[in-house]
Image: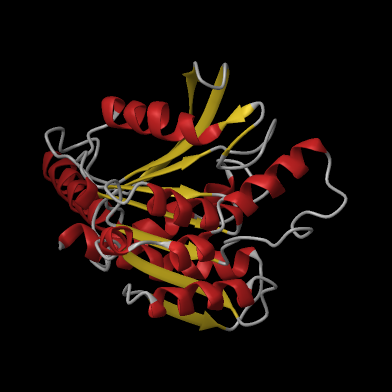
Amino acid sequence: MKRFFTLFLLIGSTFAGYSQNFNPPQGVAEFKTMSSGILETERSYSIYLPKSYSTDTEKKYPVLYLLHGLYGSNKDWVERGHVKDVANRLINAEEAVEMIIVMPDAGTDWYGYFNMNGWTYEDYFFKELIPHIEKTYRTIPDKKHRAIAGLSMGGGGATVYAQKHPEMFSSVYAMSAWLGIETGGGIQNADEKGKELNRTVLENHAVKFVTNADEATQEELKDIRWFIDCGDDDFLLSINLDFYRAMQEAKIPSELRVRDGGHDWEYWHSALYLALPFVSNGFLR
């Protein structure tokens, strides 16, 4: 009986070892909130923490800020883009480095990434959200280890944020980006909030920013890695191509991909497989 019991323990420990090997630690996605004095409200954000975050308590990580689109929320990239699964897969395959991914909420009660009447979100992002993340989590708080990306409205927000703050970000990955509108364009039949959003997107026209940039500004933009990714059936393809042409004319290095697809989550989910390796390469420069 003792021999049988000993053999049973050996077999059990062996299978436990196999189980641990087949189920390695994985990164996790969490939903969090923080108080904002600027917006005078609680703000939600989602955060992805890589697999070693809970075990290697001395390690610090680069950060990707990943922005959602119009009428979206901080939960979109987790629940619809499956960012946790993509990040785990790429990190386990060593196609991306371990990183923290922060997904803020610029939707729900208001929407938009720029300052507007009653919604100074841009101030919140730089003066409160980034400091909160860098105080709360083990980040590497410098330009080289900070990147930004987003889809649609968030792609435009990511692009403009880096244009205005080139000292903050090493890489930008813009997906199906809303990069500007002309007078009379934008959200049609908009309510007051939508009209404000239209106005601020017009004022923060990413293509015109490049076209009008002086030599010193152009040099600052050259110190950022740029990637424009838009589907061939996307209604925003034209302005994404305009942005890429403006970058070429200004001799600011950038990458462009026009892939099969439209303005939808199938496209943005697939874009993550390009975005995470791209920003990883920026972190490793």
Residue 255 in picture, x, y percent from top left? 38, 77
The quarter holding residue 95 reads bottom left
| The C terminus sits in image quarter | bottom left
Residue 171 in picture, x, y percent from top left? 32, 59
> Which residue shows up at 76% across the image and 60% down it?
185
Compared across the picture, whether 105 is left or right of 27 comes to right
Q: Viewer-proximal residue, 263 or 18?
A: 263
In the depicted structure, whether residue 192 falls above or below residue 275: above
Residue 208 in picture, x, y percent from top left? 52, 63
Q: Coloring scheme of the render?
A: secondary structure
Residue 71 seen in the figure: no
- Give the tally of numbered discs: 0
> Which residue shows up at 47% across the image and 53% down it?
160
Compared across the picture, whether 82 is left or right of 12 comes to right
> Which residue shows up at 59% across the image and 83% down it?
260
| The N terminus sits in image quarter | top left
In the depicted structure, whether residue 259 falls above or below residue 49: below
Residue 203 in picture, x, y percent from top left? 60, 50
Outermost residue, right side: 189
The quarter holding residue 134 reads top left
> Which residue shows up at 42% across the image and 39% down it?
47
Residue 235 seen in the figure: yes
Q: Viewer-proximal residue, 43 or 11?
A: 43
Q: Viewer-proximal residue, 94 or 216?
A: 216
